[in-house]
Image (spheres, rainbow, N blue to C red):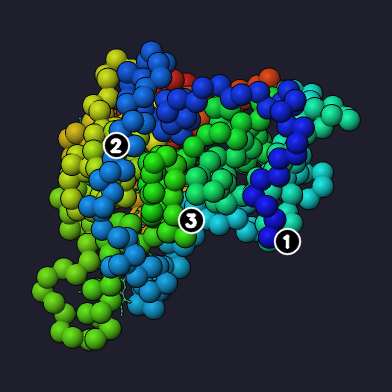
Amino acid sequence: MLPEATVPSRRRSCPGFLPPRRMTVYTYAAIFIALSSVAVKNGQSQTGPHSRAIELSAQHAEKPDFSEDSAGDAACQPCHAEKAAAFHQTAHSLTSRLPQPGSILGGFAPGSNVMKTANPELFFRMEQKGNDFFQTAVAGAAPFISQRSERFACVIGSGGKGQTYLFWKGDDLFQLPVSYWRELGWVNSPGYRDGVANFNRPVIPRCLECHATYFHSMAPPVNRYSRNGFVLGITCEKCHGPGKVHIRHHTARSPASPDADIANPAGFSRDRQMDLCAWCHAGAGDPLRAPFSYVPGDRLDRYLKLPDPNPAVPIDVHGSQVELLERSRCYQQSDLTCLTCHDVHSVQHDLAAFSERCLSCHKPETAMFPQRSHQTDSNCIACHMPLEETNLIVFDQNGKRARPKIRNHWIKIYRETAVNPGD
Ligand code: HEC
Ligand code: HEC
Ligand code: HEC
Ligand code: HEC
Ligand code: HEC
Ligand code: HEC
Ligand code: HEC
């Protein structure tokens, strides 16, 4: 096995490895998640969530050991084969994986494995050696070249839009400086300064809580985890709760118990259904209890403080589907939830099928159907849930800034759409 870090002796004199800018939790977390509007508004660093997370580690013991009552996805397969097969194609299931050929979308072949930066004396090289994948920063000009190499430990992101990668340093988990974005190829990780090699960004539990099923925290420091105590991907039991008892009942063919032995969100109240999705689709929030302790069906506000969005500040489209949907009149004046449109067990990208969901309430030939210039077979989504750029995921690449587009979940009239009928 190769060493985790190859840091040649000349590293100290290397201009490419400037000390990273002070990386606060704000700059770190804002990359992927909507933070409180206050933080977004004044751009100030927020140390709150960080110190909070360290504090919380003390409460770790109260949290049930994940593995004890959980069976894992493979155990659901025999009886729910169709659901499992479809689910394993979804972004939820694929959102974190071990590095393998196929799970890392960027290229490792010569010609596609180098990322240049704005700094002529710094580039990154991606290499596969046997079953291991490495990211190497190469800095300086010949003959004073120095390198730092780290091994991919975990892939975050299904790759629908992009992926970012993590590495271990001892038991501590960090983000790698080079990510992959579908439209750009290898890129500086979002929020990283172009031309600087930064290997110092810790991966906090909240990031993994949204993108994986479980990581056993061994904080402090906040990014220390058990190297074999994790479950990647969002699995069935993340939303349904532990399944061992359910499986035992059905395997034994004992008469079905009248008590539910596994959570079915279809039976939750509307608020608890929204809570399940808000766990990961309503911004980072402030943890009130240890990460990974939320149990679907429970009240989320006992585990996570999600600040009320400031009405004066626009909500970013990234990661805030819950707040945006809640601003919609459709939501306020009906019993609409995320589940009205989404079946999380399958991949859904057919906009005509989504438009059918609109028509289930805005029925043609009723007053709910718009009276002017509307056709029943038009694409409701394009005009009423437009794709918009996020300001929370920003890539600095070759002097350009790139921002991915995400579907806005505030269903309303966007005046600018009227000029493009039929779009
Ligand atoms: C040995 C077969 C078997 C296994 C294994 C199994 N299930 Fe089930 N499951 C069933 C059957 C049968 C039903 C339908 C029971 C009913 O409708 O009362 C069911 C129902 C469910 C329901 C709906 C429950 C309700 O109250 O509406 C959920 C959710 C569920 N299973 C999830 C899972 C998950 C998650 C796993 C893996 C951890 C799993 N099942 C493993 C047989 C199984
Ligand atoms: C444990 C965190 C978590 C929970 C709970 C969760 N999601 Fe997600 N969801 C994610 C993450 C992370 C992604 C992005 C995955 C990726 O592309 O890597 C995502 C992506 C999605 C997508 C986009 C799928 C695609 O094909 O691009 C939809 C739709 C979605 N979630 C709906 C829901 C709904 C509805 C609920 C509630 C029933 C829910 N999610 C609950 C974390 C979660
Ligand atoms: C509060 C939950 C949450 C946290 C925390 C979070 N994410 Fe995400 N992330 C999401 C959701 C939801 C999506 C997809 C939907 C969207 O963009 O709104 C997503 C999308 C992504 C994607 C793009 C996936 C794709 O292919 O579309 C990447 C990569 C990613 N996140 C990485 C990270 C990393 C790395 C961290 C931690 C440093 C992090 N995220 C923290 C919820 C979260
Ligand atoms: C992101 C959350 C989430 C994940 C992950 C998830 N489910 Fe579900 N599941 C739901 C929700 C929400 C419902 C209720 C609404 C519905 O039926 O879609 C549900 C309903 C069910 C039901 C009962 C309804 C029916 O159609 O029979 C079964 C069985 C089930 N899920 C099995 C699974 C299995 C097996 C997996 C993993 C392969 C899985 N689920 C993964 C959220 C999830
Ligand atoms: C569960 C029912 C339901 C669904 C599904 C639904 N809506 Fe609505 N929608 C409503 C209700 C109720 C109102 C408020 C009606 C009123 O004020 O007369 C509304 C209002 C609207 C408005 C006016 C908003 C405003 O701010 O003036 C638009 C536009 C709209 N819906 C479009 C859509 C589109 C597009 C979809 C599908 C993406 C959709 N709706 C899905 C129930 C629904
Ligand atoms: C009225 C229908 C509707 C409702 C309700 C709805 N969505 Fe969506 N959602 C869509 C459509 C349409 C898309 C775009 C699918 C595509 O482009 O492939 C989408 C896409 C997404 C995506 C991927 C966003 C992106 O651009 O990458 C996520 C995540 C998501 N939804 C989560 C949620 C969550 C969480 C809820 C509840 C708060 C929710 N949705 C409620 C219709 C809906
Ligand atoms: C080409 C863009 C576009 C498409 C496609 C579109 N809408 Fe609209 N919609 C608008 C605009 C713009 C308005 C504002 C009123 C107007 O100018 O007629 C509107 C208004 C509405 C309203 C508010 C009620 C009213 O009479 O003012 C509802 C509800 C609505 N649309 C639903 C839908 C549904 C459902 C679909 C899909 C069948 C759809 N829209 C497709 C652009 C569009």
Whole-percent x and y of residue 122?
75, 29
Task: Tell me if the residue at label 3 has its CB under 8 Å from ligand 3.
Answer: no
User: 367 or 134, which is in the foreground?
Assistant: 134
Residue topped by disc 3: 227
Residue topped by disc 1: 130
Q: Disc number at residue 346?
A: none
Determine the residue positioned at 22% across, 57% down: 266
**Mark 1 falls on what kind of element?**
loop
Determine the residue positioned at 66% across, 45% down: 5
Determine the residue positioned at 88% across, 29% down: 142
Please state which amino acid type lies under the numbered disc 2.
Answer: Glu
Mark 1 or mark 2, earlier in chain: 2
**Mark 2 falls on what kind of element?**
helix
Whole-percent x and y of residue 265?
23, 57
Tell me where residue 222 sits by quadrant: top left
Residue topped by disc 2: 55
User: 403 or 126, which is in the foreground?
Assistant: 126
For residue 124, above or below residue 401: below
Judged left or right of residue 78, residue 137 is right
Please state which amino acid type lies under the numbered disc 1.
Answer: Gly
Please state which amino acid type lies under the numbered disc 3.
Answer: Arg
Q: Residue extending furthest bottom?
A: 253
* Residue 64 visible at all: yes
Tell me where residue 163 sits by quadrant: top right
Ligand 3 picture quarter? top left
